[in-house]
Structures are given as C-alpha cells and as structure tokens.
Image (cartoon, rainbow, N blue to C red):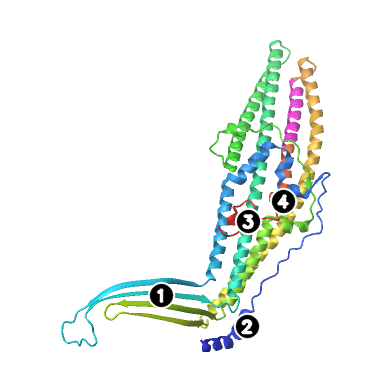
C-alpha cells in the first residue's frame, strides 16, 4: 500500500498536466438593458405572472388550466421524467458509499477411511462447516471525483426541475390559446349563421321583386348562389369548432368526455394588463433558460470527471470472516484483512484523453444551447410585446370601421327593399360589412392569444422561488 501511494504521488502531477488542456467554455448571456417594444398602457404587478390565467377573470379558463396541470398527458410525462432524474441523483450519491455484501455458507461432509491412511492425520466421521464473511470496498476520494459526481447529479436534477416547470408553463399557455381559438371559431360560426340569415332575407326580397317584375331573374339566381356559399362556410366552421373542442379536451386530459362538457362561448373578452419586465430578469424568470443554465453546470462537472479519470484510483478493501467447524475436532476461527489497491491508467490514457475532448465538445454545444435559450427568450418577449401592441391598435381600428360598414349595409338593404337601388349594391354593402366584421372578430381572438404569448414569453405560469413546487415532496427532494 505504501508503494502504491508513492507511485501515485509521483504520477499525479504528470497526469494532471495532461488533463488541464480542455477547459469549460464561457457562455455569453448578454441582453439589451431594455426592450424596444412599446410599453403597455396598463401594467400589472409582477406576481400576476405566477398564475397569469387567473387575471383574465374567466372561470372556464382557470378550470381548464388547473385540470391540465393535474391530469394532462404532458404533465404526467413531465412528472415521470422529474422522478427519473431524482432517482438518478440518488443512484449517483449511492455510488460514493461503501459497497459490500454479507455472505455465508454451510456444508456437511463425512470422511471414511477405506485403507492405507493413518488415523493420526485423517479422522473419520461427519463434519459440519459454517462460515460468514463481510467484505467492504470504497474509493478514497483523494482527487474530488465523488464531489464532482454529486455536483453533476444535483445539477441534472435542478435542470429536470426547471424542464418540468417549462413543460407546465407551455401547457398552461397551450390550453389558453386553444380555448381562445375555439371561442374565435364560435364567433366566426355565429357570424356565418348571421350571414346565412341575411342572405335568406335577400333571397326572399329578390324572389318578391322578380315575381312582381321589378328585378331581373338573375337577381334571384345571384341571391341563391350567395346563400349556398354562406351555408357551406357555416358548415365548415361548425366542423372546425367541433375538432377544436375535442383537441382541447385531449389537451386537458379529458378526451373521452362528451363535447357538451366543454362549451365554447362566442366571445373572447379583453386581455388583462401584463407586468413590465427588463430583459435581464428573463435569466431568472424563464424556466427553460434556468434549465439550460443548470445543464451547463452539469456538463462542466462531467468534463471535470473526465479529466479526473486520468488520475489514480485508490480503493480501501477491509473484510472479516468467521468460520465454525463442528465435528471431531471442533473449532472456531476468525480472521480479518485490511487491503488497499491503486489503479493508475497508463495504456488507457489515449482513450481517456479522447473522452475528455468528447466531453469538451459536448460542453460547447450545451453552452451554445444556453446562449440560444437566453437570446430566444429575449426575442420572444420583444416580439410578443410588439405584436400585442399592434393587435390592440388593429382591433380598435376595425371596431370603428365595422360600425360604419354595418350602418352602410343597413341603408343599402332598406334601399333595395324600397326599390331605390339594385341587389348588387346591397350585396356589395353586405360583403363589405361581413368582411370587416370577420376581420374584427378574428383580430379580437388573435389579441387574446397574443396576450397569452406575452405571459408565456415572460416566463409566467410558475413560482421561480420554488421550482417544481407542484411535484410530490419526495420527488422535489430527490428522495422519492
């Protein structure tokens, strides 16, 4: 053992020099000091982000999001992956503990002298042999391998916790967007049904005028064609609405429930205020960015472990054995041993160096992914704020235009009924109004979805101070 330690001391500086070439790359996570997007007119408190869907004051939205965060397939899959990461951490920690097994054996033998042997050396008769051994082995952590193993296991679990939260934040946003999309389709279907009613009225007026010789027969054909087109559009929207509701049921984990259990009202409401945020806050607020950060920490520890593989490994191997022989003669024996072994990688050195370079290349990829996550987070917030502001202005413009177009159509319809203008004038006015109305309702639905995107981009939907707080306690602690 003394010679092994001397050899280790001699070789360690040389091996350390070989391991020092590949260092962990540094991540560039700089972001601008402020967003260039227009600031919102109304600003909410930062705490709103934790459960942003409640700020819509929409009981159905709150219920669906809470159901999804509890029962959806995405939630259950994310929780299972978090439990796996916790189990891996326990496994890594256990590898640093002493290993050993208690073994035992029992046997019975009978000796019979046939001829030619002296009884002074061999005693005839039956003998029972009993023995129990306990041998232990563990690595003496002289170079910090155990500490690095603990570091990367802990970082992996932290990354898994933030990935779990990122999955849940994306799930909440998907539920909200899907609900607003379904409601937008319900509005469009309601508009299409209203168009059918209007076209039926125009067809009736055309029929009356043609039958009295006040209009050409082509007016009735045109009215019938427009009515058929409106009915076809209504049927298409009805099918889209049914599939959107069924997809939303699947998203919240209730795909076997009837569609009647998930109504979609023909209204979307108005978006709530969103909090102000500076770009630097995204590093702590976005769970996907936090996950990427801890993946860098984990990879740095694994790179260090790859370097430490070039260092000698020293194992302590104490053991003890108790044996009992029952027969003629009977006796009991006990012996123990304390041993140590040292392994110095010599011929494996080229392979280990290649593994260091491999880990260094992987570390560079992880750092790039971290930088991309930071820049993506900044870009998503910037874009969502720009689009939210633009869509808000668009809704206001279309709302005013829709009111004027509706007034123009009503005047044209009354004029056609009184014979003051032809059918084409009424149809053009109707088409203009319905087109602007559809644009307005679509813009309102899009505005709601943009607000959801803004909350998601800002990292809303979880509590940064307590990652994975919704997971079972044993999983959060890495002990489940």
Residue ID for mark 1:
133
- Name the quadrant of the C terminus: bottom right
Q: Quadrant of residue 291?
A: bottom right
Is 14 in the magenta?
Answer: no
Indicate the secondary structure of the residue bearing disc 4.
helix
Indicate the secondary structure of the residue bearing disc 2.
helix
Q: Report the magenta residues as a range.
A: 423-442
CB-based contact (under 8 Å), mark 3 and mark 1: no
Indicate the secondary structure of the residue bearing disc 3.
helix
Front residue (pair 303, 385) = 303
Give the mark nearest the N terminus, 1 or 2.
2
Residue ID for mark 3:
163
Residue ID for mark 2:
17
Whole-Å distance between the Cαs marked 1 and 2? 42 Å
Please say if 111 is above or below 464: below
Residue ID for mark 4:
457
- Pair 3/4: label in front: 3
């Amino acid at each position: 053992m003394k010679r092994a330690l001397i050899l280790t001391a001699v070789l360690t500086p040389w091996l350390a020099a070989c391991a020092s070439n590949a260092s962990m790359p540094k991540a560039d996570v700089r972001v601008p000091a402020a967003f260039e997007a227009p600031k919102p007119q109304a600003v909410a408190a930062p705490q709103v982000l934790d459960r942003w869907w409640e700020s819509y004051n929409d009981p159905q939205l709150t219920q669906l999001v809470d159901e999804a965060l509890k029962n959806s397939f995405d939630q259950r899959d994310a929780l299972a992956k978090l439990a796996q990461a916790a189990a891996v951490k326990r496994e890594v920690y256990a590898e640093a503990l002493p290993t050993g097994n208690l073994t035992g054996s029992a046997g019975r033998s009978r000796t019979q002298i046939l001829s030619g042997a002296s009884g002074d050396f061999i005693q005839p008769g039956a003998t029972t042999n009993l023995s129990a051994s306990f041998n232990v082995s563990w690595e003496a952590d002289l170079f910090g391998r155990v500490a690095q193993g603990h570091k990367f296991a802990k970082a992996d679990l932290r990354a898994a916790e933030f990935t779990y939260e990122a999955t849940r934040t994306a799930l909440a946003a998907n539920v909200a967007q899907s609900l607003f999309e379904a409601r937008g389709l319900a509005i469009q279907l309601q508009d299409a049904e209203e168009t059918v009613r209007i076209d039926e009225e125009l067809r009736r007026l055309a029929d009356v005028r043609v039958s009295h010789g006040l209009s050409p027969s082509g007016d009735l054909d045109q009215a019938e064609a427009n009515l058929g087109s409106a009915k076809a559009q209504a049927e298409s929207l009805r099918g889209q609405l049914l599939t959107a509701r069924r997809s939303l049921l699947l998203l919240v984990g209730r795909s076997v429930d009837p569609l009647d259990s998930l109504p979609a009202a023909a209204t979307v409401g108005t978006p709530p205020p969103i909090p102000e945020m500076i770009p630097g806050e995204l590093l702590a607020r976005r769970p996907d960015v936090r996950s990427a950060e801890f993946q860098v920490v984990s990879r740095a520890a694994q790179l260090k472990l790859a370097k430490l593989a070039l260092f000698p490994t020293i194992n302590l191997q104490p053991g003890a054995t108790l044996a009992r022989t029952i027969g003629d003669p009977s006796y009991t024996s006990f012996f123990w041993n304390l041993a140590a072994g040292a392994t110095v990688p010599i011929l494996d050195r080229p392979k280990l160096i290649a593994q260091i370079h491999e880990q260094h290349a992987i570390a560079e990829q992880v750092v790039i992914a971290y930088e991309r996550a930071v820049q993506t987070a900044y870009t998503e917030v910037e874009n969502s704020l720009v689009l939210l502001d633009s869509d808000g202005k668009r809704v206001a413009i279309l709302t005013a235009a829709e009111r004027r177009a509706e007034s123009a159509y009503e005047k044209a319809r009354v004029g056609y009924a009184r014979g003051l203008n032809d059918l084409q004038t009424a149809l053009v006015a109707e088409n203009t109004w319905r087109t602007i109305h559809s644009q307005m309702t679509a813009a309102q639905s899009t505005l709601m979805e943009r607000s959801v995107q803004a909350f998601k981009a800002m990292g809303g939907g979880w509590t940064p101070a307590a990652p994975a707080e919704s997971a079972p306690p044993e999983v959060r602690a890495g002990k489940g």
